[in-house]
Amino acid sequence: MSPTLSEQIVLVTGAGRGLGHAIARAFAAAGARVVVNYRASRAPAEALCAQLGDGRALALQADVTDPAAVAAMLAAARAHFRTPVTTVINNALADFSFNGDARSGAEAIAWEEFDAQFRGSVRGALNTIQAAVPGMREGGFGRVVNIGTNLFQNPVVPYHDYTAAKAALLSLTRTMAADLGPAGITVNMVSGGLLRSTDASAATPEAIFDLIAAGTPLRHVTTPEEFADAVLFFASPWARAVTGQNLVVDGGLVKD
């Protein structure tokens, strides 16, 4: 029987703010113990842990692109909770503003912009998975959920670097699922569109939110809290036979 959410130790990367904040809250509300990872957002990360209370949340600083820092974070989490991390949510995002008017177009974008996104999305996820897998193997159970985007199915905005990195992360999701499945570790992705609202989407004009809402069957732009519900599904016992999948959560805007 798969552990319930309340039995899991969950690492949420980039949880100091935005979507990660909402995901960490959702896991804590379900009874899980949560590692709130942050790179620079120390004050909001620590404030969140204080709000969650009862010693069930721990704020830990680490740049997920640094494998040594990630390994130290996993070790600190294990020492604090006296058991390994069971569940990894790869949410951390390299600095990015979701404002199409401010992004580099096809003729101007530089490889360095792609490199920054690949390091944040793919290298960051690789580091956390590799650091967490030994503990998962030890317990015979593991859950990895990578955060993706619906833009590689519906590239309506020229986020070339961000979208390419998330597409690569989907490939990593599927190859890791095949590799780690025999150890009882599932690897899935939850992909959203624009969320209303996070720090990353704060620069998005209101007219764009309204346009997206009008294009969905629900006539609604997904919130971080709604997105977090789908992340919890993949970590829950109800998803114990699901791996290598990508679930698009955007109100029905994109059909995968």
Image (cartoon, rainbow, N blue to C red):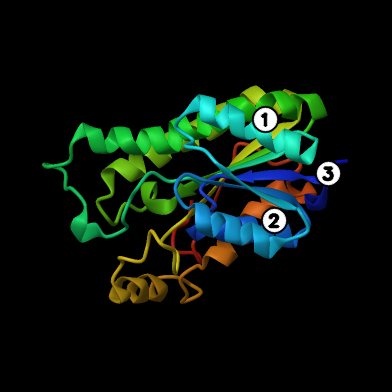
Label 3 sits on a secondary structure element that is loop
Q: Amino acid at mark 1?
A: Ala
Camera sees residue 54? yes
Q: Is residue 192 left or right of residue 98?
A: right
Foreground mark, 3 or 2?
Answer: 2
The correct choice, above or below, for 149 with respect to 25 in the image is above
Q: Amino acid at mark 2?
A: Phe
Label 2 sits on a secondary structure element that is helix
Q: Amino acid at mark 3?
A: Pro
Q: Which residue is mark 2?
A: 27
Q: Is residue 107 left or right of residue 249?
A: left
Q: Is residue 79 left or right of residue 218?
A: right
Q: Which residue is mark 3?
A: 3
Foreground mark, 3 or 1?
Answer: 1
The correct choice, above or below, for 236 with respect to 180 in the image is below
Residue 50 shows which numbered tag? none
Given the current orientation, which residue lies at the most extreme right position? 1
Q: Residue at x 69, y 56 (%)?
A: 27
Crowdedness near tag 3: few (<14), some (14–19) or many (≥20) residues, C-alpha within 10 Å: some
The correct choice, above or below, for 138 with respect to 63 in the image is above
Q: In this rendered view, identify the residue nearer to me: 50 or 115.
A: 50
Of callouts 3 and 2, which one flags the residue occurring earlier in the amino acid sequence? 3
Of callouts 1 and 2, which one flags the residue occurring earlier in the amino acid sequence? 2
Instruction: Work out which quarter of the rendered image holds the N terminus and state it.
Output: top right
The correct choice, above or below, for 96 with respect to 202 in the image is above
| Mark 3 touches mark 1? (CB < 8 Å) | no
